[in-house]
Amino acid sequence: MSEKVLMKANEAMAEAAIMAGCKHYFGYPITPQTEVAAYMSKRLPKVEGGVFLQAESEVAAINMVIGVASTGKRVMTSSSSPGISLKSEGLSYLAGCDLPALVINVQRGGPGLGGIQPSQSDYFQATRGGGHGDYHMLVLAPNSVQEMVNLTFKGFDLAEKYRMPAMILADGTMGQMMEPVSLDMGEVKQYDKSWALTGTKCEREPNIVNSLYIDPAELEKINIERYERYKLVEENEVMYEEYLMDDAEICVVAFGVTARVSQNAIDEARKKGIKVGMIRPITLWPFPKDVLNKAADKVKCFISVELSMGQMIEDVKLATECKKPVYLCNRVGGMITSTDDVLKSIEEAAKIGGEN
Amino acid sequence: MTVFEKPKALTDKVLHYCPGCTHGIIHRLVAEVIDELGVQGRTIGVASVGCSVFSYNYFNVDMVQAAHGRAPAVATGVKRSDSNNIVFTYQGDGDLAAIGTAETVHAAARGENITVIFVNNAIYGMTGGQMAPTTLPGQITQTSPYGRDVNTVGYPVKVCEMLSQMDGATYLERVAVNNVKNIKKAKEAIKKAFQNQIDGKGFSLVEVLSTCPTNWGKTPVAALGWLEENMLPYYPLGVYKDKTKEEN
């Protein structure tokens, strides 16, 4: 039984990154994730080979990440919604250069400058890539401080395994939560880095890290090959959690903080005799399409509980092929769905639920 | 006895630059310096966006292609990943002095131990000859078809002068490649800029006044003349900062 420490999620993620062998962090202050940078600024100088740099902007930070990633080393940056928009160009370049890196988004209300309270309204941005062009990032959605730690560790691993960027999509609540965590993550896996920029030592041909392919036939080939890798990710790396789904007639779909709230609401609803359960996606990309599609054959309806104007609901509809109705239970602007909000939605769904 | 040969730090790929473009000369100077300093095996170059975007095909070292303007930030990552890497950026005036101004200024402010080669030809070459931050007053370009009007679009950016105010910058020199005498001085400056990095002395930038015959609408020889008559007076050659001299 490994020792547990009480930690704030933002700081726990930073420590998990160091456990995962990440010695390079570039960031910029923005609420509600500045603790990540503050923690790294104290911790990394004490790690051998540790590099902490507060960059002049989120744009500069993601490009510093590209620099380290191109040398084959683990590297991370973190930000919140408006700062992630600034990084969009860099995310596209990371994907286009097939570089592993971890990016943390502790979401806040938007659009524009928005608010500093939690949201999940960057779902589209994260799962559709964020930047321009055809590409995906691994998107991991933790719902506890322990999961923040586990998914940070796993994020680095998957990013290197598949040579693509990975994003931890958290929200302001998750970032600020304090819970006991175990930091015992086990061994860091090693992957082939023969592509990395380490200096030729005049012993090999130069390596080039690049995303420019002027010949359209070549660029098409590269895109197709990359999507073949993405197919492997979709086949092998989907993660989700089911809660009380065995006899469920209503399926709640939620991630992060709304999943925590929904679980309470489901327990309340069950006391009232409503047969409701939850499928909680842990990977938002790849999205757990198969389990949702199978559930659509059994349940009467779905409820997507999100802190957005309705983003994940589209993926639920796509995954279930609209076989059953999908309702939205949402708050935005930094407001968080309460247990009552979700319970009300469940009760409404139970009344009209699909057919009766 | 070999009198003249291709530097080892240049590949065999045929350069795509226009006839009379001075990128060819500058590439060669950088490659000769890398050879002479014996650092080819540990040099990592950061290509930028502009006519030199394909420089990753020409320099015989590990290379990374950066987004427009971001080369100094990418270089910061590469250098801080392993200080044994000799890291240089190769950037044009749009890349360094327009979109990349913040990354340039802050790399200098932090005193990043990197070498920046800044090719200033007073125009945006790759995209077909638009106005650059370094375009001279009255100069005609595709986006200043009536000549750069300082009343509406302001004045050119003098990078060496601007960066000379930064405590973090170690060595800033402006050179030109319009004649043999200047080319020789340009090579010395580039060599110093790389030697500073080897010695861990901090941020070095060499601004190289260059020609763009195609977009200036001149023959290669006439372009060299235009540089001499118009750019040298506006962008005086010389050392704008040298902390290494102050130390001695």
Image (spheres, coloured by chain):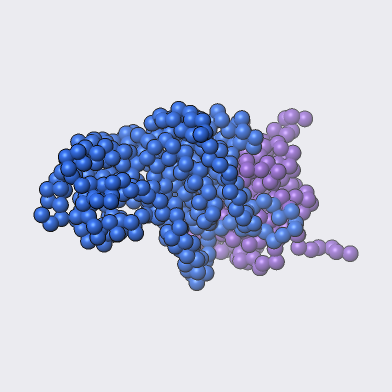
Chain colours: A blue, B purple
Q: Number of callouts in the render?
A: 0
Q: Residue furthest right?
A: B1
| Quarter the C terminus of chain A occupies | bottom left
Camera-side residue of A28 and A128: A128
The residue at 27%/56% (across/down) is: A295
Relative to A77, is A209 above or below? below
Camera-side residue of A214 and A303: A303
The residue at 81%/63% (across/down) is: B4
Q: Is residue A217 left or right of residue B229?
A: left
| Residue B161, image x, y percentages | 59, 38
| Residue A300, image x, y percentages | 19, 55
The residue at 45%/58% (across/down) is: A236
Camera-side residue of A140 and A80: A140
Q: Is residue B101 visible?
A: no
Relative to B61, is A87 above or below? above
| Residue B24, image x, y percentages | 66, 60
| Residue B160, image x, y percentages | 61, 40
The residue at 42%/59% (across/down) is: A234
